[in-house]
Amino acid sequence: MEELRAVQLYSQDKLIELINANTHLDKVVEDRCQLVQDIEARADVLKVPAYQFLWGDMLAWGVCVDAAPSRGIGYMEDAANQGLPAALEQLGRYYAKGTLVQQDKSRAVVYLREAAALKNLKAQIRLVELFLEGYGSPYDYEDAYHWLYNSVTDDKQQHQQIAGYLARLEKLMHPKAVREAKRPLDS
């Protein structure tokens, strides 16, 4: 018989690390759903954004609790409204694809733009993809180009993907806007 062990609640930094690696739900299951009440309390009472996101994801997909997608999206929106980049990116992705919500690419652009401004690389890439599909405003191209141009990744395939997107986006921009977009991040 397996030995039952007490599981410590995740620190905010650890939870954000798990969320960014998209392993947060796996970790809750791996910990045998022992922390459900603590997670809910930190989301509902303390209103900690990372826990709001985790609790929302658990509710949305029925992980360790009965599925309640509408409530789950509500908690993710609460986390996004507090500026959690992962929540902004995920909601943007959901609206772009129509996952759990009605597809709304204009709303996706709003969420993804905010996450991209907070240096979320997945959001930066998805935002440029939507721009290349014709969504969003050309006024935002320079910012999106700037963020993606200054992004850092050690994934060679992703690096090539980014270079391709930048080349395509560049064709939609005025040359002066491209020059401006190529400035260093903190200038």
Image: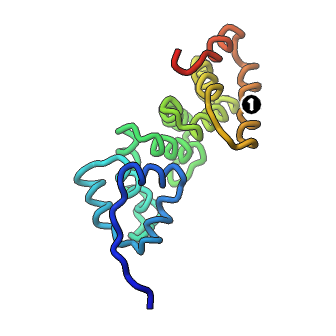
Q: Nearer the viewer, residue 75 or 10?
A: 10
User: Residue at position x 74%, y 30% from top?
Assistant: 163
Numbered disc 1: secondary structure: helix
Percent of width and height locating residue 128: 64, 31
- Whether residue 74 is visible to the viewer of this picture, yes or no, is no
User: Residue at position x 54%, y 48% from top?
Assistant: 94
Q: Which of 110 and 54 is in front in this view?
A: 54
Q: Quadrant of residue 63?
A: bottom left
Mark 1, Cα crowd under 10 Å, few <14 / some 14-19 / many 20+, is: some
Figure check: 180 above or below 165: above
- Give the farthest residue toward the top: 176
Which amino acid does the dot numbered 1 rest on? Ala
Percent of width and height locating residue 60: 44, 59
In screen coordinates, is 131 left or right of 102? right
Figure check: 132 above or below 23: above
Q: Nearer the viewer, residue 168 or 4?
A: 4
User: Residue at position x 71%, y 34% from top?
Assistant: 162
Quadrant in which the N terminus is drawn: bottom left
Figure check: 42 above or below 29: above
User: Residue at position x 74%, y 41% from top?
Assistant: 156
Residue linked to disc 1:
163
- Whether residue 118 is visible to the viewer of this picture, yes or no, is yes
Percent of width and height locating residue 181: 62, 17
Number of numbered discs overlaid on the protein picture:
1
